[in-house]
Image (cartoon, grey):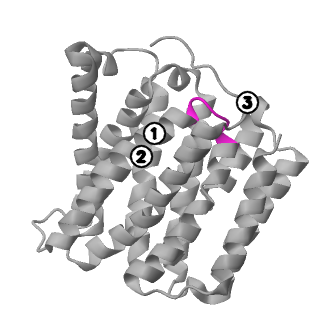
Amino acid sequence: MGEAVRQRPRLDGLAIGLMVVLCTLWGVQQVGTKVAIEQGLPPLLQATLRAAIATALLLLWVLAREGRRGVARLFAQDGSLRPGVVIAVLFALEFILLFTGVQYTSASRAVLLLYTAPFFTALGAHLVLPGERLRPVPALGLSLAFAGVAVTVLDGGAAGGSALGDALMIGAAAAWGVTTVVVKASPALGRIPAAKLLLWQLGGSVPILFLAAAAAGQVVVPHATPLAWASLAYQSVIVAFASYLAWFWLVTRYPAGRLSAFTFLTPLIGVAAAAVLLGEPATLGLVVGLGCVIVGLWLVNRR
């Protein structure tokens, strides 16, 4: 538990396959969030319950695998307190902005703007992580992938946004990107297992999210439909618990910039999901954007 995890210089087949699965799950997430809000589950209460449920599942998972000693190790002193609090605050901020912003924009536009996060990650990694400087070809790949997202937005397939919604979603993207850089830059966080890394974010964010929900007057018994609760279950169990655990396992073993670049698939999947499930418009720009993203990812990950 005290030894640093060995870093791998590039993404292998396992990392690429897992990232495709994660991007699919995350792409559908914004649709689920939008549906739950429309079906009567207040956004900040939804964010709080999501983090609390996922935290409980994480502790049960560690208990089942490692017993009480495993759970005790999660709370042991290991030098991760200070950076752990930082990423807990950043995580809470991300989801306060995200769950508030999705009220003011379409699900497709929300996911597109949220996944500008790789640029904040890549820029931050370039500035503070000597081993992840942006070289010309990967930088070109990132730019091309971003162009694919921009084409999709400008094409009109993600209509229905607002200046407030856009600003909140970009703020959430910035908080996510900075969180990833902090995880990579902190030696203490690099030595702890993925379960504890996730616990810092999920468990640490619960009181902050609860206070935000209380301040917004959203700590009430909601008149939510079964569909809203089903969406919350998906977000809590599949996304916040299982997918985040996998994400932080990856981020401690592979280059942060290359992993984050892969997340450009998520907005395109999200736009497609919004079109199919919510009837939001998707156009030829989606196909053009997808082509740009695929080529961009190839440039980022080429030997």
Residue shown at the point (46%, 55%) measured from the top left: 94
Residue type, mark 2 in image? Ser
Please indicate, yes or no, whether residue 59 appears anywhere in the rendered image: yes
Residue holding disc 2:
243
Residue type, mark 1 in image? Ala
Q: Are marks 2 and 1 in contact (CB under 8 Å)?
A: yes
In the picture shown, does residue 201 fall above or below 67? below
- Residue numbers of the magenta segment: 251-257
Residue placed most toward the observer, 258 or 184: 258
Residue shown at the point (39%, 71%) measured from the top left: 31
- Regarding mark 2 in the picture, which secondary structure is present there? helix
Residue holding disc 1:
246
Quadrant position of residue 104: bottom left
CA–CA distance between discs 3 and 2? 23 Å
Pointer 3 local density, CA inside 10 Å: few below 14, some 14–19, many at least 20: few
In the picture shown, does residue 4 fall above or below 90? above
Pointer 2 local density, CA inside 10 Å: few below 14, some 14–19, many at least 20: many
Residue shown at the point (39%, 59%) measured from the top left: 96
Residue placed most toward the observer, 224 or 281: 281
Q: Do the residues labelled 1 and 3 touch (CB within 8 Å)?
A: no
Q: In which quarter of the image is the N terminus?
A: top left
- Regarding mark 3 in the picture, which secondary structure is present there? loop
The mark that comes first in sequence, 1 or 3, is 3
The mark that comes first in sequence, 3 or 2, is 3
Q: Is residue 249 left or right of residue 71?
A: right
In the rendered image, residue 303, in percent from the top left (x then y), is placed at: 83, 39
Residue holding disc 3:
9
